[in-house]
Image: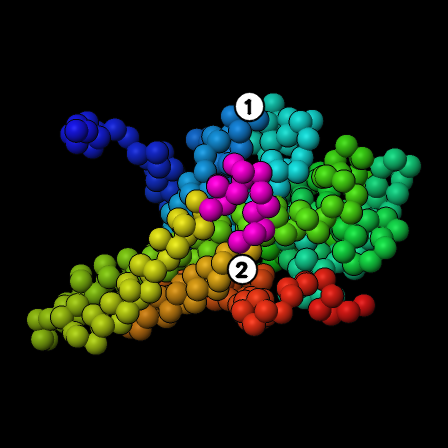
Amino acid sequence: MANTNLARALPSKYEELDQAIADKIAKDAERNDAEIRFPRENLEALAEIGWAGVLTEPQYGGLGFSHIDFAEASYRIGQADASTGLVYVMHVGAVQTINLFGNHDQKERWLKAGGRFLLGTYSTSERASGGHWWYNFSEASRDGSDYLVNAEKSFTTSSGKADYYVLQTRTPGAKDQTDITFFIVNGKAPGITPGRWDALGVRANHSGSIKYEGVKVPQRDRLGQEGQGKDIIYHGVSPVYLIGLGAVWEGVAKGALDAATAHVTGFVHQDKNKSLADYQAIRQQLGEVKVLLESLRPWRNELAAKLDELQRAGKPQGEILIPLTEFKVHAAEVANKAAAAALTVTGGYGYRRGKLERLFRDARAAIAMGPSNTIAREWIGKVLVGQPLELFYEGGE
């Protein structure tokens, strides 16, 4: 029989993570939101304890943990600050794309990086295709054996702040819209111009536009083979992005519920000598959110475990693209429900500038972030009725 006293004494795998969230991420959330201040220091704090490389093998400077751990970290960070959570998810997603499709040289230079922390992100969507972020009109050109990138990306988290961008664009001389190639683009390369970011919510994640004008990319920084981009999108970019994204919104829901519960149990109407928690209508609203929130954790862990299983078996993680998409949709809606309920039960106090008001604004971004819930439901519905999910031909050309 296990020694339960010893088990309780052992430190949690997440102890250092929780400390970093409490000491840095939660502490700076309001200031970063108010000042539209990019949370670089938060990512550096996560990197110091290894969590920026949660999925990366130790030989390349990472922890070598599971997707379950990555999703749990995203959830915990999301409770404190959605902006930092999104920057974290995009970074880990970019890293994991290099983990899965990069070569030894790329992992040494961009992941291990001589012990330095390099912040990565995705740069994918284009204004012309809107929420169809996987569909590009830009096309790389050749510069001898190297490449030149000319592209305008509409939304890139960490725009102008990342050390490198995992960028997708059409292959030089592309045969059709599925002929896509990925590149690792140095964030300090000449020709990169980030746009201004000022938004309703997630104001610190700098998810602005970014322009690439004649940006030279060495051949050694092509990620995978020419034309392999479609496989990378389905089986590299989408799975880790979706599980992390859903986990952040789950965290936002938990953060809103916890803050609302603390307020209603601590606030007393002195004229009636009753706390807000004594009102049945308020308890019912909180209870409804609690039930919805409880549906997310087991689903998240099941999907993350499946990603680990597929990776160990060398199988494409895109096999569970639709269940991951469903999780993202549900988590986004629960976050919005929780944030709205929190403002309702706390009255004017929640409506003032502060954590609950910030969570309400942040949660709204969950609906729009690609795939938007509208587009995602179309994916889910097509598969449900037996129609093919071919993302690259929906708009024609």
Q: Residue 206, image x and y in percent?
A: 58, 53
Residue 316 colored in magenta in the image: yes
Q: Main secondary structure of the magenta part?
A: helix
**Residue drawn 29% across and 64% down?**
291
Q: Position of residue 395 (x, y in %)?
A: 73, 70
Q: Secondary structure at mark 2?
A: helix
Mark closer to the chain start, 2 or 1? 1
Mark 1 closeness class: few <14, some 14–19, many ≥20 residues within 10 Å: few
Q: Visible in this render: residue 361?
A: no
Return the residue at label 2.
322
Question: Does the magenta-highlighted stretch encompass residue 72?
Answer: no
Q: Nearer the viewer, residue 224 or 25?
A: 224
Tell me the quadrant of the picture where the N terminus can be found: top left
Secondary structure category for the residue under label 1: helix
- Which amino acid type is shown beneath numbered disc 1? Gln
Which residues make up the magenta segment?
A: 306-320
Residue plotted at (47% across, 30% down)? 63
Structural distance between the alpha carbons of marks 2 and 1: 33 Å
User: Quadrant where the C terminus lies?
Assistant: bottom right
Tell me how the rendering is colored: rainbow
Can residue 327 be seen in this snapshot? yes
Compared across the picture, whether 241 is left or right of 336 comes to right
Q: Is residue 121 left or right of residue 225?
A: left
Residue 378 coordinates in the image, percent (x, y): 58, 71
Residue drawn 43% across the image and 61% down it: 331
Q: Which mark is residue 251?
A: none
Name the kind of residue labelled 2 in the image. Ile
Per the image, the residue denoted by label 1 is 59
**Residue at coordinates 58% horizontally, 42% vertically from top-left?**
315
Left or right: where does residue 393 sit relative to residue 237?
right
Q: Nearer the viewer, residue 121 or 198?
A: 121
